[in-house]
Amino acid sequence: MLQTLVHYSLHFLAPGLIALIFFRNQWKKAWLLMLATMLIDLDHLLADPIFDPNRCSIHFHPLHTYWAWIIYVVMIFFKKTRIVGIGLAFHLLTDFIDCIWNRTIF
């Protein structure tokens, strides 16, 4: 229960806090863009079963790989893709925390 609360708080509330701190003048747009990055979870539809609470998403789903994470971090360095890059990278960080919580990554 606590893990689920932490996970979804990080997915929904933390991007809002990041937007308020780093994109104060356009925080609503930044928050919505970062929330939109959760669409990378559509790659879960390729898995069988689609949802497994004990599965580590990192390196299991195509858009949740370490290679994808590198691309998302590189996006942060370009002004036009910065907000989306932060959202994607933070999304994977949140999923990584879940993997550590479940001890399925090591």
Image (spheres, grey):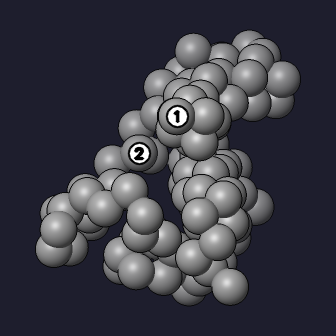
Labelled pair 2, 1 in contact (Cβ < 8 Å): no
* Mark 1 nearby-residue class (10 Å; few <14, some 14–19, many ≥20): few
| Figure quadrant of residue 104 | bottom right
Q: Would you place residue 25 above or below residue 75 in this image?
A: above
Residue nearer the viewer, 94 or 55: 55
Residue 59's spot in the image, x, y percent?
48, 82
Relative horizontal placement of residue 43, taking residue 69 as reference (left or right): left
Residue 91 vs 29, above or below: the answer is below
Residues 94 and 31: in front is 94
The residue sitting at 68% across, 85% down in the picture is: 106
Q: Which quadrant of the structure image shows residue 60?
A: bottom left
Q: Residue 65: tell me if it is visible.
A: yes
Q: Residue 29: percent from the left, percent from the top?
A: 54, 22
Residue at figure coordinates x 27%, y 66% from the top left: 43
Residue lying at the far right of the rendered structure: 21
**Furthest residue toward front:** 1
Question: At which x and y percent is residue 100?
Answer: 68, 66
Indicate the amino acid at tag 1.
Answer: Met
For the point 43% across and 64% down, the residue is: 54
Q: Amino acid at mark 2?
A: Met
Circle 2 — which element?
helix
Pointer 2 residue? 38
Q: Secondary structure at mark 1?
A: loop
What residue appears at the point 36 percent right and 75 percent down from the top-left corner?
61
Considering only order in the chain, which callout, 1 or 2, is on the residue closer to the N terminus? 1
Q: Nearer the viewer, mark 2 or mark 1?
A: 1
State how far apart marks 2 and 1 are (Cα). 21 Å
Is 5 left or right of 103, judged from the image as shown? Answer: left
Say which residue label 1 marks.
1
Q: Nearer the viewer, residue 67 or 13?
A: 13
